[in-house]
Amino acid sequence: MTTAGVEVLHAVRLLGFADAAATAERAAVDVDVAIAALDAAENVGWVQRSAFADLDGWSLTTAGRAENERRLAAERNQAGATAAVASAYRDFLPLNGRLVRAVSDWQLAPTHDDPLAPNVHVDIARDTGILYELGELSAELRVLIGRLVDALPRFSGYDLRFDAALAKAMAGGLRWVDGTNIDSCHRVWFELHEDLIATLGIDRATEA
């Protein structure tokens, strides 16, 4: 598998489900390169293409996840980065708990009658407090990514993407906090989480 193919396989892992254009963008390769890599990966059973409604994209198979983790483990071991990534991951977990709570608070504003009432963003003070918490997490993330990049340079950029999304949210773009189809704070954080557990070979379902 070419270097581009490895990057494309990992991009599909991080995105979960994506078309060729999104996969190419995440892997930082041309679309035609991504398509060729996806076709090659499909031929050996590492990815599968699905289409429903107006969505058409790729996802990893069980074999593809195993191959992705095998390659990440080889990269990690060759770089001698296991201890550093594991340490960063342990420090990430409490930050992840805070991020999950902040996003939940952004989406829901419980009332006495409805504990699942949606947040309609009329309480400016409440929203400002949540954005402040995301700003605090951004500062923590910057330090964490610095540690990860020292171990494995491919972790670079997560903090910059998070900051870019947060700036748009603070400017009034509410969906930049939790939007699923844009590079929102939540989307960037989710990808970092997936990157960490993939790199360490951890099952998210049984994550401590």
Image (cartoon, helix red, strand yellow):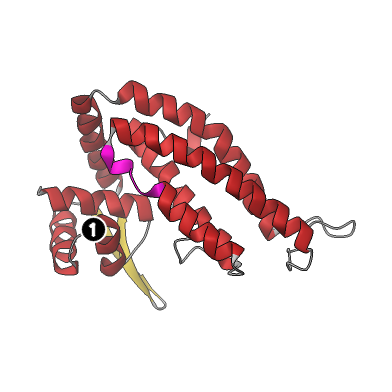
Instruction: Name the side, left or right, on which 140 lies relative to 112.
Output: left
Residue extending farthest to the left is: 2
Residue behind mark 1: 28
Taking depth in this image into account, of 182 and 53 the one nearest to the observer is 182
Residue 95 belongs to magenta span: no
Q: Position of residue 15 (x, y in %)?
A: 37, 56
Tell me which residue sits at (12%, 57%) in the image: 40
Tell me which residue sits at (24%, 51%) in the image: 9
75 in relation to 167, above or below: above
The secondary element bearing badge 1 is classed as: loop
Location of residue 77 by image quarter: top left
81 in relation to 41, above or below: above
130 in relation to 92, above or below: below
Instruction: Name the side, left or right, on which 5 lies relative to 186.
Output: left
Q: Position of residue 49 (x, y in %)?
A: 28, 64
Taking depth in this image into account, of 151 and 57 the one nearest to the observer is 151
Residue extending farthest to the right is: 112
Q: Which residues are magenta?
A: 153-158
